[in-house]
Amino acid sequence: MECKRLDFTIGDVIEIYEGPVGRLWELLMGEEIHVGGEKETDLLAEKAGINKTSSVLDVCSALGGPARHLARKYGCRVTGLDATGKMVNEAIVRTERDGLSHLVSFRQGNALDIPFHAGTFDIVWGQDAWCYITDKERLIRETNRVLGTGGVIAFTDWIQTGKMADNECEELNTFMAFPYMETQDGYEEILMDKGFKIIEKEDLSRDFARHCHLYQNKLRNELKQTIISHYGNELYQAADDGLDKWVMAADEGKVGRARMIGKKI
Ligand SMILES: C[S@@+](CC[C@H](N)C(=O)[O-])C[C@H]1O[C@@H](n2cnc3c(N)ncnc32)[C@H](O)[C@@H]1O
């Protein structure tokens, strides 16, 4: 069922998030740029067992919305890692604004070469971003390295859930600049192979399809004029066309989202 991998690189992702795309996603989803917002962050936190003694690494932290939420609500320390300078800088500014810099910090870097020593964190965290990563095996190996013994990996990601023709898959991934999406079974295999025991896995694809419709309605009914006036009609049309393809693929059960919790053994 695997689709052909595309040759998007970390440089492409940085270029995209240095431009208006990060802002567009924020308009659509909020400061926490993932499906389900704060509610989903709380659910993942509960499943990961986050408390005030936890030291969390958020891999692909973007604007740092989840990192601040975790620190504010649970009192834990959070380090955000993101490749895009603009996202890291904005995350730092917002964290200072919210008076959370004593708990939350950010570092620019590549998830495939996590710039921290072995055993630094209790929890590695990711929300709806690892679909951008070009080598999921290496990513999970890196997360295992920076976790202490018994550490927890907790993440959600956009996944492939059904068979697709190569051109359909290519269109969906190209719109998002994803090199490829994992399947849930694929993630399970990688986690077990890289030294994790699976604690929980959940297919959230029905909820993903519902959210795709919500985002499409928001784009068309609330954000259209703002986007056109700030970024032009071409960008609006591209967003509308791309999102439409995702809505259809989600309805047809070809793409979705999963939540995975693992423990380092
Ligand atoms: C959808 S946003 C992440 C949203 C964030 N997890 C949240 O819930 O608010 C994707 C982010 O992944 C980052 N990213 C993509 N590939 C990366 C890589 N190889 N290393 C580090 N960051 C990466 C991008 O710079 C971007 O900020």
Image (tube, rainbow, N blue to C red):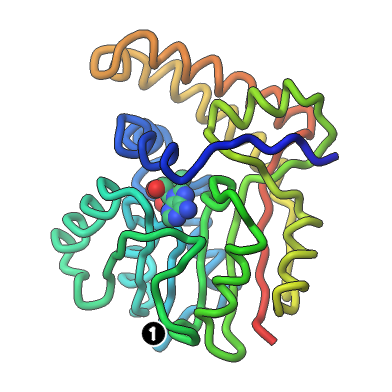
Residue 217 rendering spot, x and y as whole percentages = 50, 22
Residue type at mark 1 is: Lys
Tell me if 15 is positioned left or right of 202 in this view.
left
Quadrant of the drawing holding the C terminus: bottom right
Q: Is residue 8 above or below residue 203?
A: above
Q: Is mark 1 within 8 Å of ligand 1?
A: no
Q: Quadrant of residue 207?
A: top right
Q: Nearer the viewer, residue 65 or 38?
A: 65
Quadrant of the drawing holding the N terminus: top right
Residue 37 visible in the current orientation: no
- Tell which residue pokes out farthest to the top in this image: 233
Residue 233 rendering spot, x and y as whole percentages = 35, 8
Residue found at x 81% / y 24%: 165
Tell me if 23 is positioned left or right of 261 in this view.
left
Crowd band around label 1 with a 10 angstrom C-alpha radius: few (<14), some (14–19), many (20+)? few
> How many numbered tags mark residues here?
1
Residue found at x 76% / y 49%: 183
Residue found at x 71% / y 49%: 182
Residue 96 rendering spot, x and y as whole percentages = 15, 63
The secondary structure type at the circle numbered 1 is: loop
Q: Nearer the viewer, residue 18 or 42?
A: 18
Q: Is residue 194 above or below residue 231?
A: below
Residue 19 rendering spot, x and y as whole percentages = 30, 32
Residue that carries the numbered disc 1 in the rendered image = 52
Residue found at x 74% / y 41%: 160
Tell me if 197 is positioned left or right of 133 in this view.
right
Residue 225 visible in the current orientation: yes
